[in-house]
Image (tube, grey):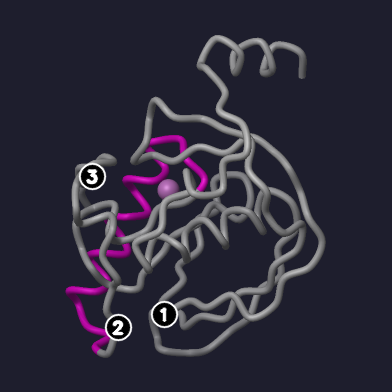
Amino acid sequence: MAIRNIVKEGDPILTKKCRRVEKFDDRLFQLLDDMKETLLQSGGVGLAAPQVGILKRVVVICTSQDKVKEFINPEIIETSGNQQSVEGCLSCPDIWGVTNRPMNAVIRALDRNGNEFTMSGEGLLAKAFCHECDHLDGILFTKYIIKRINPAELEERKQKK
Ligand code: NI
């Protein structure tokens, strides 16, 4: 496994639409393993393949403490409710903002063996599902910001919790 470099905002790769995964081979497994390691090291909640420079529909998300799940060719199939909360992105290290997102989301994807599964998420997890799937269509979370938050304000919010 290896840590991969995270592409930052401004790089055109982050605005491109990714291709569906057709081959479940060693190359894919290597990508998944590297993305998981990169995510765990970064301390983020999720990571999409274009963020490591690969235009494939592959996402990894921390679904619980230190548990990273793989989502191949993921799709959001259902959303409900609404939440406004602080959101950030590993590709935009200096940008934080309050976004409007669904409170609940259901994602459908394939695992590395090509088996389909669905998973429901609430709150942070629902937000991560939407955020990461958007990356695969070249969409950044900044599109959903209703209020920018400066880093000092973010620290204050963290301390209050
Ligand atoms: Ni992101």
Image marks 1 and 2: residues in contact by CB distance under 8 Å: yes
Identify the amino acid type marked 2.
Answer: Val
Structural crowding at the residue carrying mark 1, measured as other residues with C-alpha within 10 Å and reported as few (<14), some (14–19) or many (≥20):
many
| Local SS, label 3 | loop
For disc 2, the marked residue is 21
Residue 34 vs 149, above or below: the answer is below
Q: Nearer the viewer, mark 3 or mark 2?
A: 3
Q: Tell me the chief SS of the magenta region.
A: helix
| Local SS, label 2 | loop
Residue 74 vs 126, above or below: the answer is below
For disc 1, the marked residue is 73
Residue 29: image location, x then y, percent: 27, 71
Residue 83: image location, x then y, percent: 76, 48
Determine which of the numbered discs, if any, sits on residue 7 in the image: 3
Q: Counting residues from the N terminus, which is met first, the one under dot 3 or under dot 1?
A: 3
Q: Counting residues from the N terminus, which is met first, the one under dot 3 or under dot 2?
A: 3
Quarter-of-image position of residue 3: top left
Identify the amino acid type marked 3.
Answer: Val
Q: Is residue 40 magenta?
A: yes
Q: Give the spatial CA distance, label 3 vs label 2.
A: 21 Å
| Local SS, label 1 | strand
Q: Give the spatial CA distance, label 1 vs label 2.
A: 6 Å
Residue 110 vs 97, above or below: the answer is below
Structural crowding at the residue carrying mark 2, measured as other residues with C-alpha within 10 Å and reported as few (<14), some (14–19) or many (≥20):
some
Which residue appears at 46% of the width and 63% of the height?
134
Quarter-of-image position of residue 111: bottom left
